[in-house]
Image (spheres, coloured by chain):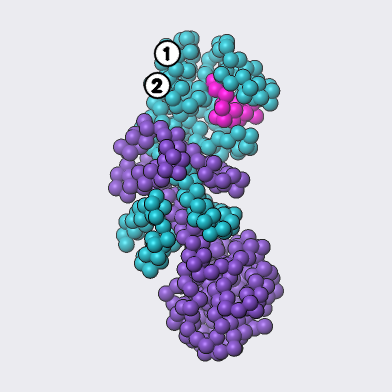
Chain colours: A cyan, B purple
Amino acid sequence: MQIVIIGSGNVAYHLAKAFVLKNIPLAQIFGRNTENLKKISEELHVPYSTEHLEDADLYIICVSDQSVESVSQMITKKNCLVAHTSGSLSKEILIGGYRKASFYPLQTFSKSKNLEYEKIPFFIETETEEDKKLLFDIASQVSKNVMESSHEKRKYIHLTAVFACNFVNHLFSKAKEISDSQEIPFDYFLPLIDEMVQKIHEIDPKSAQTGPAVRNDVRVLEMHEQLLKDESLAIYKTMNHSIKKMYEL
Amino acid sequence: MQIVIIGSGNVAYHLAKAFVLKNIPLAQIFGRNTENLKKISEELHVPYSTEHLEDADLYIICVSDQSVESVSQMITKKNCLVAHTSGSLSKEILIGGYRKASFYPLQTFSKSKNLEYEKIPFFIETETEEDKKLLFDIASQVSKNVMESSHEKRKYIHLTAVFACNFVNHLFSKAKEISDSQEIPFDYFLPLIDEMVQKIHEIDPKSAQTGPAVRNDVRVLEMHEQLLKDESLAIYKTMNHSIKKMYEL
């Protein structure tokens, strides 16, 4: 079973590392960025190339959404399986005579950060039962959470992640704008944030909601609105409206 | 130095516990809820009463915002210091002939949960330098982060916490609505959430932003909008608009 990872970014690096740590052999890492590939290759002891794509049974494409289609056309072999790792693309974006699949690891990948790979959920979609079994086998060696997922379902997974991760991070940015304006170290809010996040490991976030909106504390809500403007005010109003709707206030 | 805590809820419990753990003696816990007071009293070995308010040098009022004013009027003693623990009220809400203060611990307090008290920031406002020193001395025994804060500043602290904590929790609720609708366990998103929160312990959230809006990925943004409606759609649009503004996209 020959596996090739295509890409030289964070997803390629972490997926390759997760495979190597579980003794899943990689035939090659293929990409454009020689510097990155060289680093990955040296760390993980996997051959790399920027020119000659190795013959393989499985190619996993770990490039940006915009590049998946063009990269997929570089694979001219027919008797093989090709999977992309995008949360938002269908497997039909892949163009070639091979069998197609999606192999989506749900995580935010940073360079040089250690991740607990066994906690990363993998969502898999294939054309055949055989390919499904193959990708489940591989993903299950890396992670405890492997699930089948249609393209339609994957769209919602990605959307959930946008709410739970991208938007949350933006709220932290907006919060930091406010605390910076008062010269209060944003670090002071980290214990509060940690505690709130710890809570949703234990109880439904809906039961954990606190704050002026869920108390319908009109005095505080009006006072806060006077402190805000522009996008911050729009976020404040939109979030409070949504909280009131959810709790039927 | 006699200290009395007034209140029988989560803030009263945790503040009392934090004091007792640091051998700051409490003369009494006073409140209305006999059952709660009895539990706190037994656990922390502090006397309680629902009727007779003990004579003290410092009273710390740990009740809901709405009750602070009326509770403060129960203290008829003049030569003493009275502090409330609200993030949004001024110290002038306290009605009596005593010296007034605000003693605001920034944390979300749940029952029966262990907290690392030394990480909880305390924000202090007093009328005199002497009282400031007194409350700083006490808070510094409990926590490493003690800061002076005017009422005006405290408003912004509270507002920052609403963005970083209450709104974030609501985003988790909305995210769970989406994943529930697809029968995807919300637990699958916890490693992603943990990783994202871990990141902002190390780097500015503004530098950590990912997702379709900051990439200005119009294809994904439009696809997501078609999957959403009502409050979720409003949040989606408002957050993306704010992200684009922040990164000048």
Considering only vertical position in the picture, is B25 above or below A13?
A: below
Residue B119 magenta: no
Label 2 element class: helix
Considering only vertical position in the picture, is A128 above or below B61?
A: above
Gap between marks 2 and 1, in whole Å? 10 Å
Label 1 element class: loop
Spot occupied by residue A141 in the image (x, y as percentages of width and height): 58, 30
Residue at position x 45%, y 27% in the image = A65
- Chain to which the residue tagged by mark 1 belongs: A
- Chain to which the residue tagged by mark 2 belongs: A
Name the kind of residue labelled 2 in the image: Ile
Q: Nearer the viewer, residue B148 or A246?
A: B148
Q: Main secondary structure of the magenta part?
A: helix
Residue at position x 53%, y 45% in the image = B205
> Magenta residues?
A5-23
Mark drawn on residue B249? none
Residue A14 magenta: yes
Q: Quadrant of the C terminus of chain B?
A: top left
